[in-house]
Image (cartoon, coloured by chain):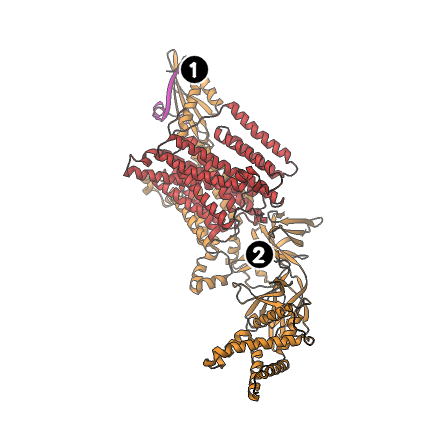
Amino acid sequence: MNKIAGTMLTETSSSLVQWLWRSAMALVAIILISMYYDVFDYYEVGIVVLTAVGMALLGQNWPGIRWYIAVVGLLSLFAVDRYANDLSLANTDFFLSYMLASQSAVMWMSVLFVMAMVVYFAGLMFRSEFIQKVATALTWSGSAMGLVGLMVRWKESYLIGSDVGHIPVSNLYEVFILFAIITSILYLFYERRYQTRALGGFVLLVISSAVAFQLWYTFERHAHEIQPLVPALQSYWMKIHVPANFVGYGAFAMAAMIGVAYLLKSWRQSVKPEGILATTLPEMAVMDDLMYKSIALGFAFFTLATILGALWAAEAWGGYWSWDPKETWALIVWLNYAAWLHMRMTKGWHGRPMAWWAVIGLFVTIFAFLGVNMFLSGLHSYGTL
Amino acid sequence: MSASNPLSASRKTFSQRLFLFLGSMDLAITLLLALAIASIIGTVLQQNQPYSDYLIKFGPFWFELFESAGLYDVYSAIWFLSILVLLVTSTSVCVTRNGPAMFRDMWNLRTHVQRKSLGAMRHNTMWSVESTAQATVTTLESTFSKLGFRVRQTPKTDEVLISAMRGGMNRLGYLLTHLAIVVICLGGLMDSNLPLKLAEWRGQIKVETQDLPLSKIPAASILAVGSQAFRGSVNIPEGQSSDVAFVAMRDGYLVQNLPFQVEVKDFRIEHYATGQPKSFESDLVVYDDDLAEPLTTTISVNHPLIYKGYAIYQASFSDGGSALSLEAWPLDSQAGKEPLSFDTKVFERRKMHWGDNTSQLEITAFRPFNINPDPTEDDPANVRNFGPSIGFKLRANTGEALEYQNYMLPVTRDGRDFYLSGVRTNPNDEFGYLYLPIDEQGELTGFSHFLQRLHDKKISEVIAREMTLATLNEVANTDQKLAQSLQDTLIKLVDMFVKGGFANVTTFIETTLPEAERDSLGPAYLSMLREILARVYVDGLNLAEQQSPTESQLMFLQDAVDAVGSLTRYGSPIYFMLTDYEHVQASGLQIAHSPGKPVVYFGCAMLIFGVFLLFYLPQRRFWALVKENGQQTDILLAGMSNRNPREFDGFFEEISEKLKHTKGNSSVR
């Protein structure tokens, strides 16, 4: 079925597929819990169940993510199997050293994302549906390699020492990968939903910037080395606080890039209405709506993440709110987007000013994410540069 | 939060206008942004630091200006709290104004709509079926119900209106999110230090700014056990206990009494193989008359103890007054005497009498391990344990202090072992190190012995004479006066060196020698000095005839000369050697009582629930107007949604298809 770009795709999968998918997720959760029943505590069982429910919901009407989850799962299992119990295989085993060892997988992710960005823009330039489809495939692959990289890194940390092992969302290097993965998946969701690939280059631009930073960080600072967790981070809260936060950051970043596309189109329309950007980018109303959608999503998850952070702080730092620089900047980001949403939902503002505001919002978010760690001192100093 | 009606504004009373202003969207958005901007201040300017630091940083003028603006504790400054109060007021007014309408809208199925307004809606469709109106109404109603809608039928004059709604709880999202802000802020207020500030303002309590022992703290600075919120901290050495916590306030503190006594049995740090800390744990015992027997537990970071609503956290650690055995090795003219042994404790201060000088020794720190980067390796990740160390200050009568750091175990450098002692004048500087060479027995005696010989005028006289003779023998004619002058110069050089190192000798050369001779004689003086220092050393070895010093002895000489040369910069007449210790740690506990916590958490739950309802549960309404038209029945279906108009296009299509194709409805016009 060919749909016009920008129309909503509300296609649902057949109920047989839906049930198969849900059962598969339930089965994986049950297998995991029964295998590790002895070592899991309640929270870990809870996290497995919640993850399975989340995956089941995400995949019930979205074939792409079903393939994604299956492929990532199988590749990760294969890598874990290759490793057996010897970390040094990362350099000698063919599959590990060229593809699946976390460092190699992350390199693949980096290359694929940068290629995807270039190809998306090329597709836009040549107005080619085919080239853009290739870009979508590259984005899926990049995001799969990134997640495989994180999964394998998780295993590698346990191979270093059973007391060193931890989920790889504990430092700046790891969360940069997480950011790239989450932002790309969010984008792919909306790409399918809105049947438009024209925005891909813009969103991949922010992902590629993250990748560039992450590469610098790897080569210049050896940030990819796995470090044991400081006592303050040894908490199950980390497993949910950090990912929730990055859904927020990713959605805000995507909103800002759509804002950029919006502003570009509105500028080109007034200068050269028959030009490439003015004609190939989605309708203004579609972008406006998408921008709102991503900010709403980001806001919901950022609210959740900040509250989870407060619950964690109450356990680790002795109070749910300490006006620590990181907490305060989280509040500033939250207040900023709260004001944006009120402007939009109640005052009905839209268009260029809101697009500008979304772009400025990204800078506020980047400061909260990176600037605080670089320039301000405080309790939340895990991601120092 | 809706805009006021401008037409009627002039006819409203002041309080009505104030109410409208407070509930206005413009004010709300302004406050959100104002709060965001105000919050930045406290992240840029480090909060709650010692006031003296601020004074040094800003100078007296700005210090006072910033202090009066409350910038050192922005988040409890009056003006900051006022913004918060305004935001809460604005939100409350908004909920009061819009709440009832929202609440009604959650349930109201809007049964008063007219055919005309349905036809004007963006989404509408018409079709006819060949059955009675009554049957159609029943079918439609049951289909709507099956699709999850709430339905009601309203008979009109010659037709029936079916109203249906899904997602009415979207409005609950609005109520929950906005009430949540009010609830969270109220909970936060319960946990704030505002009551303390009020009590201080009324003169009931007084912030103590001096560092006093607990027994001397005045009653006005002590807070009784009660229901009030606080966040205090206390350092408890192992084996000791406390029934108070110290609450920091501005540039001082208050003492909060606790309804129980907490004892620290043991404090432990575990390390990873790489040396990074792995865990901080304290074994605690809580004593309380309400307990049948004392409560024994272990807390660690991320795993606090909650007892009677008081949470006890592992926050920090420090030395708890470790017992130290020290030896004082003289480095001045007293060198060579037996070192003086004494026992002390970390944080102890004692007067030291040394010749005519009195100074105060303040032990500031003890560390049983020093896992530092290995200086002999290029990779800073390669760490090594440098053994125990002590930190102390030597304070002169003038109040000035030098800070030292001494390592207990010798450190190897270039294959030789040294006792290492760091010194600095300013806490922000790096330590400069004195390397005291150890002798073949692994002791400091060799160095001490050499130093003693250098201080001994008789020895230097004898050696100087020998050396003069040896030098002049090589010259044919011996001039008595020259010999005497050379000997005096040698003695003088040794004296200068002992008093001030090579720098002192160089200054001596520059000030006493005529400029013309300086370039030729200067280096000669320095090599003569090195020669006589070596002779003093070798002479002290009491070697047998014809025996020359070994390679390692010569190395020792070189290191000893370097060490003596830097003694002036070292600044202390004594080297304190750590000979034994008993490590006692103190666990830094944070003790908090926050009665507002459940309120805040409840507010948070409301907020999360509300936000997701608001964004992801669109309120969708449908109306079907059913009218009998001869043999068939006409149906007008219309729908609207308050979110996601784009998504609703598809949804309306889907729902209308389902309604049209339900059993019994066949013909579509």
In the image, B28: left or right of A167? Answer: left
What is the residue that sits farthest to the bottom in this orientation? B480
Which residue is the site of mark 2? B377
Q: Is residue B227 above or below residue B170?
A: below
Quadrant of res B403: bottom right
Task: Name the spot of residue B241 as percent of width and height, x first.
Answer: 66, 56
Chain A display color: red
Marks 2,1: beta carbons within 8 A: no
The chain that appears orange in the image is B
What is the residue that sits farthest to the front in this orientation? B476
Q: Is residue B241 visible?
A: yes
In the image, A232: left or right of A270? Answer: right
Amino acid type of the residue tagged 2 in the rendering: Glu
Secondary structure beneath dot 1 equals loop
Chain identifier of the residue bearing label 2 in the image: B
Task: Name the spot of residue B584 as percent of width and height, x first.
Answer: 66, 59
In the image, B156: left or right of B359? Answer: left
Dot 1 surroundings within 10 Å: few (below 14), some, or many (20 or more)?
A: some
The part of the chain drawn in magenta is B110-128
Q: Is residue A151 visible?
A: no
Amino acid type of the residue tagged 1 in the rendering: Asn
Looking at marks 2 and 1 on the same chain, the residue that comes earlier in the sequence is marked by 2
Task: Name the spot of residue B648 as percent of width and height, x first.
Answer: 41, 28
- To the question of a shared chain for discs 2 and 1, the answer is yes
Which residue is the site of mark 1? B665
Question: Is residue B147 or residue B345 the one in the foreground?
Answer: B345
Quadrant of res B493: bottom right
